Structure formats: structure tokens, C-alpha cells
Amino acid sequence: MIDTVIFDWGGTLTPWATVDHLAGWRRLADVLHADDPDRAEVFAAALLAADEARWMTVRDEHRAFTLAHVLADAADGADHPRERYEAALEAYREYWVQYTATDPDAAPMLAALRERGLKLGVLSSTAWPREWHEELFRRDGVLDLFDACVWTSELPWTKPHPTAFHAAMSAVGATDPARCVYVGDRPYDDISGAKGVGMRAVLVPHSDIPAVQHVAVDVQPDGVIQRLADLPELLADW
């Protein structure tokens, strides 16, 4: 029998959305260079390029990174006051609020699994700090439904690296991967990563994953669901 279910965040608990990433970085750059719009535009483009390069490293080497890494990679030599730097990050964060609503099916689904005595967790490959994610979960009423959340911005590795999955197991108190299920939207990062450490894996196949992030894998999930609400029934006999 399974005793643990661990979830991906973006594309799984939070539905995938088409986002203008340059516009998000422009929000940050406009605050840092409020007195120089042309410089802000150039810096925003540099931030986007640095962000995309870091995600390519995630794809190819599974090395984790943070927003601080992106800002350092795109650094233009300016020395910004700490208050302006923090305000710029907040502007970037606010841009993402519209794209980060938790799936309405998540809370009742999670509550149903908790009633069965299952441990619940999150493992997300992300550059964002823990407090950003937890505030989103708190806003949507699901934070207290998880036993633990692991964000790769606090780890050296991202999915599908085995250490990321082991970190999530450890955080929720799971010891046997064969009794764990991972639920995610990406065949490479989520399904192959979970099965590679001995977990079962459930695919939520609705994300329009950017072509540049695709990696072909010869692996099949143990189950496929079209809605998060379908998960308790799928797992009933596992």
C-alpha cells in the first residue's frame, strides 16, 4: 500500500498558463532603473536571457538556481540600494500573482487523501524562494494540507535528479519509495524522475511544455488523470 503522495507545483497543482516572461522581468527592471527606461528595457532582455539559460542548465544538468543567480548572471554593473532591489523583486512577484491560482480541485482532493492517513508533500523545480510559494498556498487555503514542501531553490539539484526526490521523501517522513506516488505534468522531470527512484508516478497531461524544454523519454506513468479530483479514486486500490 502507498503511504505518501508528493505533487509537482506548476502545471499540476497550479494549472499551466501562457506567460509573457519578458513582461515579468520588465516589471523588475523598471523598478531598478526607474530613471532610465532604455536601460530598463536592455536589462529586462538580459534577465530573460539569463533565466532561459539557467532553465537550459536545469534541463541538461539538473542544477538548481535562484532568482539571485539570474540577477547576477544579467548584472549590468549598477549598484542598487537594498530597498530598491527588494521593491524590484516585489514588482516581479506581483506580476506572477495572476498566473498562480491553485486548481480549485486541489483542496478537496488533498483533504480526501489526508482523511485516508496519507502523507502529502510538494516537490517543485523553482527559482522562487519558499516564502513566495507558501504565501500562494496560504492565499488559496492549501498550505496546511501538506506535511512538507520542498523547493529546489533550496537544493543543489532539480528534478529529475534523484536527490531532489529523496529530499521530498525525507521532508514528509517517507522511507520507502515503493510506497510513494509522485503526481506531475512532465514526462521527463516528473514521471521518469519519480520512477527512477522507485516511486509510482501519475501524469496530469495538460501542460503546454515549451518545445525547448522537451526531453524524449521511454517511460510510462502508472496512471493518468484528467483532473486532480480523479486522483483519490485512482489511488484507492494502490
Image (tube, rainbow, N blue to C red):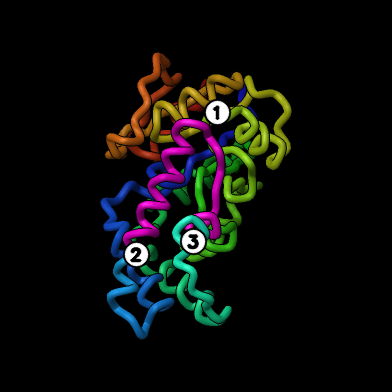
Q: Which residue is mark 2?
A: 44
Q: CA distance from mark 3 to mark 2?
A: 10 Å
Compared with 110, 130 (above or below) is: below
Query: At x 33% / y 68%, what residue is drawn?
Result: 26
Do the residues bearing badges 3 and 1 touch, measured as CB atoms within 8 Å?
Answer: no
Kind of residue indicated by mark 2 = Ala
Element type at marker 2?
helix
Query: At x 62% / y 36%, what residue is drawn?
Result: 118
Q: Which portion, as a residue range, is magenta?
A: 45-70
Q: Which residue is mark 3?
A: 71
Q: CA distance from mark 3 to mark 1?
A: 35 Å
Query: At x 61% / y 28%, what residue is drawn?
Result: 162
Kind of residue indicated by mark 3 = Leu
From the viewer's side, name the closer residue of 185 and 151: 151
Residue 50, how many percent across, how many down?
A: 42, 52
Residue 194, how many percent across, how many down?
A: 54, 26
User: Mark 1 Cα within 10 Å, few/some/many (few <14, many 20+)?
Assistant: many
Do the residues bearing badges 3 and 2 touch, measured as CB atoms within 8 Å?
Answer: no
Mark seen at residue 181: 1
Residue 170 left/right relative to 44: right
User: Mark 2 Cα within 10 Å, few/some/many (few <14, many 20+)?
Assistant: many
Please state which of the two labelled residues, at mark 2 or mark 1, is closer to the viewer.
2
Element type at marker 3?
helix
Please state which of the two labelled residues, at mark 3 or mark 1, is closer to the viewer.
3
Magenta span main SS: helix
> Which image quadrant for residue 97?
bottom left
Tell me the quarter of the image containing the C terminus.
Answer: top right
